Amino acid sequence: MTIERFLTGITTSGTPHLGNYVGSIRPSVQASLRPGVQSFYFLADYHALIKIDDPARIQRSTLEIAASWLACGLDPDKVIFYRQSDIPEIPELTWFLSCVLGKGVLNRAHAYKAAVDKNTAAGSDPDSDVSVGLFMYPVLMGADILMFNAHKVPVGRDQVQHIEMARDMAASFNHRYGAHFTAPEAAIEDNVATLPGLDGRKMSKSYDNTIPLFAARAQLQKLIGSIVTDSKAHGEPKNVEGSALFQIYQAFASADEARTLQQAYLDGIAWGDAKQIVFERVDREIAPMRAAYEALLADPARIESILAAGAAKARAIATPFMVQLRHAVGLRDLRAQAAASVKTAKVALPLFKQYREKDGQFYFKLNSADGTLLLQSAAFASPKDAAHSIAALQQQGAAALATLAAQVVLAEGVSSAQVDGALQTLREAKAQAKSEKNNT
Ligand code: TRP
């Protein structure tokens, strides 16, 4: 079975909320258990630096996000789970990719363009408050993906442009330096719900309407109690369409459970009672993971060692790949020059072939690099005699043809100059191989 590589990054800029759980953590953990899949999940802490300049918050968020994924069932033995900043090959690859990507592509990136548009509208300098980091965001992300030659990148729609840019970078690099990178594809999970937040808009930190994934039970109850509803009274039939409360319930409940609550809506359930049902259902799924989360938060050393093991697995891939890429672009050991030319010669070397015919006699022939016959020997009584003639040709080149006139004939249409050229190539290759051996 061919293994498909899935890779996704989680920016360490906040505390995971129910929307992250439903939209990303839960489906990713499930996907990682499928056979035929190798998953790379990582904490994108270099990306977090673009948005956040509070070191304590970066550290806290990294801890919370790592603990959340592990508590939600991510198995670090099955998945390569690592922290981006533990892989020094990623910033190195970022530089390689920035040298093959047109700046204009980055000018058109949505996030950068939005910042520029905002500045322009405000009459400020277009690049005001735009860091080079923000501008380069897609290149760093491309390096994340191409470093491991991921096939599929599960992301939200807002990230699709970044995946397209990664494909661009892969193509430009491959075009210049040979086929090193796989073109990644975005895997958009359209059937995964985007969860509404407390105010009914999409749950998002920027709207300040989130429910933290691991809020304590009492806080979870309070927050679910504060989800907006309309003002229909107890006994009045209620609509599930447009009900944020119902959508949150659906993300956790079975189809049967959802139908039951839908009926209760129609029957005029009081909002307070509906909220209690939703709270209990969400808490039923979260509670066991909450206990695991709290245990992990209390043991950061354990998380560190899990991430260190993940980084070792990731670097077992990244380090040799980077060696290959450095060589490809020409960042090379200067002594390796001779070896490189031998390699090119190797694929195109003429060849002596010795063989025995049915008549019991021994023969040889010389083929050119492309396999056409240059020279055919007469019969020899022993392999040693044949080898003797070959040695004379190898040492003297076409000059030996005169003395060997009785033993070898040129193939039809082949000149002695052609044979001489082939023999010369062989001698040079041999000399280079020898000097290479002495150098290493
Ligand atoms: N940009 C992604 C986000 O904001 C996070 C991320 C960083 C990422 N590197 C990645 C996602 C590589 C997928 C692949 O959600």
Image: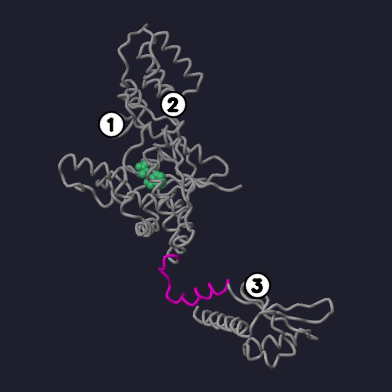
Which one is nearer the viewer's eye here, 428 or 34? 428
Colour basis: one colour
Q: Secondary structure at mark 3?
A: loop
Which one is nearer the viewer's eye here, 291 or 421? 421
Label 2 sits on residue: 251
Where's residue 426, x and y in %? Answer: 59, 81
Q: Nearer the viewer, mark 3 or mark 1?
A: 3
Q: Is residue 346 magenta?
A: yes
Label 3 sits on residue: 371
| Crowdedness near tag 1: few (<14), some (14–19) or many (≥20) residues, C-alpha within 10 Å | few
Q: Is residue 194 magenta?
A: no
Which of pointers 1 and 2 lies earlier in the amino acid sequence? 1
Q: Residue at x 45, y 28 (%)?
A: 285
Where's residue 44, x and y in %? Answer: 37, 47
Q: Are marks 1 and 2 in contact (CB under 8 Å)?
A: no
Disc 1 marks a residue whose amino acid type is: Tyr
Ligand 1 is in which quadrant of the figure? Answer: top left
Residue 207, disc: 1
